[in-house]
Amino acid sequence: MKQPCVYLLSSRRNGTLYAGVTSNLPKRVWEHRKHLVEGFTKKYGVDRLVWYEQHETMESAIAREKAIKSWKRAWKIELIEAENLEWLDLYETLF
């Protein structure tokens, strides 16, 4: 699945959120799940894929990530719950 994607990770339902962008979502989420990525996600245990969106170009994915990062937390929660009401970990659905 090599395609530009924006994604949201969570530590748990309504937990700490993280927005990221990548061209290889399964690989990147695996790195977060194994705590191989130093920084915020490792420090706060943010490793559950709760939302993602595919894009045609990396430029559009980066623009969307920047927009989402500037959103209020409530808007991010609405975005997640519009497609994933139970906050299920979507990692396994990537394969």
Image: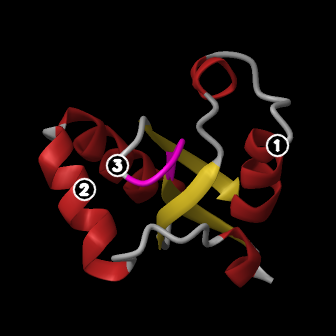
Q: Is residue 48 left or right of residue 95?
A: left
- Residue 47 % position (x, y): 65, 45
Task: Indicate the quadrant containing the C terminus: top left, top right, bottom left or bottom right.
Answer: bottom right
Vertical side of 92 occupied by 5: above or below? above
Magenta stretch: give its range: 9-13
- Residue at screen point 50% across, 47% down: 10
Q: Please tell me whether residue 75 belongs to the stretch shown in magenta.
A: no
SS assignment for the magenta stretch, majority: loop
According to the picture, the residue beneath numbered tag 2 turns out to be 77
Q: Which residue is mark 1?
A: 31
In the rendered view, does 89 fall on the left or right side of 15? right
Q: Position of residue 62 (x, y in %)?
A: 43, 46
- Does dot 1 land on a helix, a strand or a loop? helix
Helix, strand or loop at mark 2 = helix
Marks 3 and 2: CB-CB under 8 Å? yes
Q: Amino acid at mark 2?
A: Ile
Q: Tell me the tag on residue 56.
A: none
